[in-house]
Amino acid sequence: MKSRAAVAFGPGQPLQVVEIDVEPPRKGEVLVRITHTGVCHTDAFTLSGDDPEGLFPVVLGHEGAGVVVEVGEGVTSVAPGDHVIPLYTAECGECLFCRSGKTNLCVSVRATQGKGVMPDGSTRFSYEGRPLYHYMGCSTFSEYTVVAEVSLAKIHPEANPEQVCLLGCGVTTGLGAVKNTAKVQEGDSVAVFGLGGIGLAVIQGAQLAKAGRIIAVDTNPSKFELARVFGATDCVNPKDHDKPIQQVIVEMTGWGVDHSFECIGNVNVMRAALECAHRGWGQSVIIGVAGAGQEISTRPFQLVTGRRWLGTAFGGVKGRSQLPGMVEDAMAGRIRLEPFVTHTMPLPEINEAFELMHEGKSIRSVVHY
Ligand code: NAD
Ligand code: AHE
Ligand code: ZN
């Protein structure tokens, strides 16, 4: 079938909105009509050429919501008409990782997903007869996409897709990092570095966990207003200080914060986030994705004196079993999504979403088909 899609033909190039060909779903696969997709910084990261797993030409996008159109052989958990959110972290329920009870990092389709193909090693997308790669098992920048059954969460049919698409990545990652990874407790102090969709979701999660002090850090002060809406108690711009930001936060708090979160993808800020964690027990969660060849460093003494360095993917959330409940939490107002959606646009204007992100003017742009 034909599908309108925004294709990344090469690194650093704007997306091109063209009509691509999409093959029907094969065994264990599902054809989904995407109605809405958010644009996450990770899409921009891969488009930039910095992603070690980046492949071109590719259909990017991994923060979508849609409706099942057709199922392949053997698919039982979803049917045409079901409302779904594609998952870049699958949940098969059977692999070593799913059965461990310790992680959400299912490996059932991860190897082929990273190579831009379906589990059988082939692609369902082509343009003018040449194959296009899939992305993160989702490719939500195509109106019609094919995903593995294990990469779909079935959600409430009345959920607002313009908002719940954000549970496909950004908001779930931030909320989950607080709840599942850091396990923030009532009264704990928190510092959040980077106030995009991820950092603001961390702040919302911290407020839901009844954290005490929530320190929001960004070099772009226009982000502070929304940070306060979500529960930040202090907003700090590193550019306003002569000292390193970790020293500023340690001085603000006495000994540092109980939990810090890096939501940027900057290895220098990752170090600062670790070093502003409380002596003896403070922990720092890396959420940001850093480019090929980048490494983190700190004095080992920072860890010897009790700080812990953690990381999280999709906030530790198991998509098929936990995302439907989060969608219902959003429908009931227990999770706030509306403030994240600062811009909406039709597919032909998708490059504007990337521009707004790079200019620091948006939190989330949501593209509709
Ligand atoms: P974004 O671009 O919307 O937000 C990043 C924010 O960081 C901006 O507000 C920017 O002003 C701020 N910033 C930039 N440099 C800074 C600095 N030196 N100090 C303080 N603030 C600074 O991005 P996003 O969509 O919120 O994504 C954030 C990061 O999280 C990206 O690296 C993305 O790839 C990653 N991510 C990871 C996961 C995961 O599962 N681990 C999931 C989603 C996104
Ligand atoms: N491909 C990159 C890594 C990218 C990365 O870390 N992705 C995050 C999700 S970002 C969503 O916006 C993640 O979940 N990683 C775990 C996984 O299995 O991909 C690289 O460095 O190769
Ligand atoms: Zn993302």
Image (cartoon, helix red, strand yellow):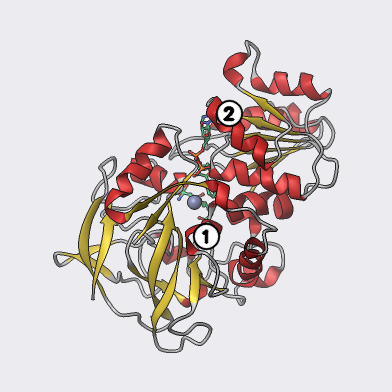
x and y percent of residue 229 in the render?
Answer: 65, 39
Q: Identify the mark nearer the N-term, 2 or 1.
A: 1
Tell me the amino acid under the disc marked 2. Asp
Question: Which residue is drawn at the image coordinates 35% and 38% (left, top)?
Answer: 355
Task: Tell me, for residue 218, which label it has, or none.
Answer: 2
Q: Quadrant of residue 24?
A: bottom left
Which residue is labeled 1 in the image?
A: 168
Q: Is mark 2 within 8 Å of ligand 1?
A: yes
Q: Are marks 2 and 1 in contact (CB under 8 Å)?
A: no
Q: Is mark 1 within 8 Å of ligand 3?
A: yes
Q: Quadrant of residue 145?
A: bottom left
Location of residue 94 with respect to 361 vertically, above or below: below
| Direction from residue 118 to residue 188 in the image, left or right | right
Location of residue 49 with respect to 270 vertically, above or below: below
x and y percent of residue 232 in the render?
Answer: 70, 35
Tell me the amino acid under the disc marked 1. Gly
Question: Which residue is drawn at the image coordinates 49% and 61% (left, top)?
Answer: 88
Quadrant where the image shows the C terminus: bottom left
Residue 49 in view here: no
Q: Residues within 10 Å of mark 1 (few under 14, many from 20)?
A: many
Task: Tell me, for residue 322, which label it has, or none.
Answer: none
Q: Residue furthest top?
A: 242
x and y percent of residue 321 in the render?
Answer: 64, 72
